[in-house]
Image: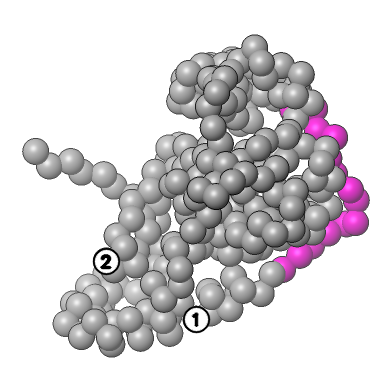
Amino acid sequence: MAFVVSFDRLVDYDQSRPGITITIELKLGRSSISVPVKIDTGSTHCLFTRSVGEQLNIDIEAGERLTVSTVTGSFLSFGHWVTSVSEGFEFDSMIFFAADDSVGRNVLGRFGWLDRIIVGINDYDGILYLRSHDE
Amino acid sequence: MAASIVDEFVTKIRKLPRTDREELLRRLNEPARRRAEKTTIRSNGEKRGDDPNVRWIKENKHKYAGNYVALKDGKLIAYARTIKEADQAAKAKGVDRPLLHYILAEGEEAFYAGW
């Protein structure tokens, strides 16, 4: 049986970089920042570095506290409502920011991004297909 | 650009050896990569943190563990086991763009692969 899924955005990503990296703009109030981010189906939440949150002028520790587990331990993060814009898709969702400066990666995880977009990955050709549930 | 021209390009590109295709893609992606690596910031210098929706989650999350909540202006509009149900319930109540958030169930772990 064949299943057909249609998408309305095609994104070429750079296969020479580790992971599947796209650019995202985070907006809060009149502050905004554009940063590279990896699509990470293994992450429960969307998580960004402390530096990104601080550059958005967020009081990091005022957010929703969340302990995040990794394969080697855990670290603390804090969630804030942020608007994210990537490849034309805009979502308001809770984005978590690492409390510790040592967490150095930005990832789009399940809750907050993957749960509100339809994603197709063709890693063989380095192509990402995207579609909103609303379109 | 006409679709036929795009098709012609794609056909020609597909015939290229893999190394040439990778080089072509690298060159095409160069501007986007430069943009991504160059962090751009616009800020008004105002510190943000106290949000009514975050406050609601801190105070009420224990009641809705394992559910998606749909919030607006610090008030609960709807909740459900799936994002689709919570979204549709909020929209049925006239809230077009609810803030949707999943509250972890008791014992459920937040995981970060971070590859």
Quadrant of the drawing holding the N terminus of chain A: top left
Query: Is residue A45 in sight in this rendering?
Result: no
| Residue A124's disc number | 2
Structural distance between the alpha carbons of marks 2 and 1: 19 Å
- Which residue in the structure is indicated by mark 1? B30
Percent x, y of residue B11: 18, 77
Q: Does A52 sit left or right of A133 as displayed?
A: right
State whether residue B105 is above or below residue B6: above
- Assign a secondary structure to mark 1: helix
Percent x, y of residue B73: 75, 25
Considering depth in this image, is A90 or A101 the residue closer to the camera? A101
| Residue located 39% across and 43% down the image | A118
Q: Residues within 10 Å of mark 2 (few under 14, many from 20)?
A: few
Considering depth in this image, is B44 or A52 the residue closer to the camera? A52
For the record, the magenta segment spans: B40-53
Instruction: Please identify the residue farthest to the right as the structure is shown.
Output: B46
| Residue located 33% across and 81% down the image | B22
Percent x, y of residue A60: 80, 45
- Identity of the amino acid at label 1? Glu
Q: Chain of mark 1?
A: B
Considering depth in this image, is B110 or A51 the residue closer to the camera? B110
In the image, residue A14 lies in the stretch drawn in magenta:
no
For the image, the number of numbered tags is 2
State whether residue A6 is above or below residue B115: above
Chief SS of the magenta region: loop
Q: Residues within 10 Å of mark 1 (few under 14, many from 20)?
A: few
Q: Does A13 sit left or right of B47 as displayed?
A: left
Residue B75: which quarter of the image? top right
In the image, residue B44 lies in the stretch drawn in magenta:
yes
How is this picture coloured? one colour
Residue B50: which quarter of the image? top right
- Identity of the amino acid at label 2? Tyr
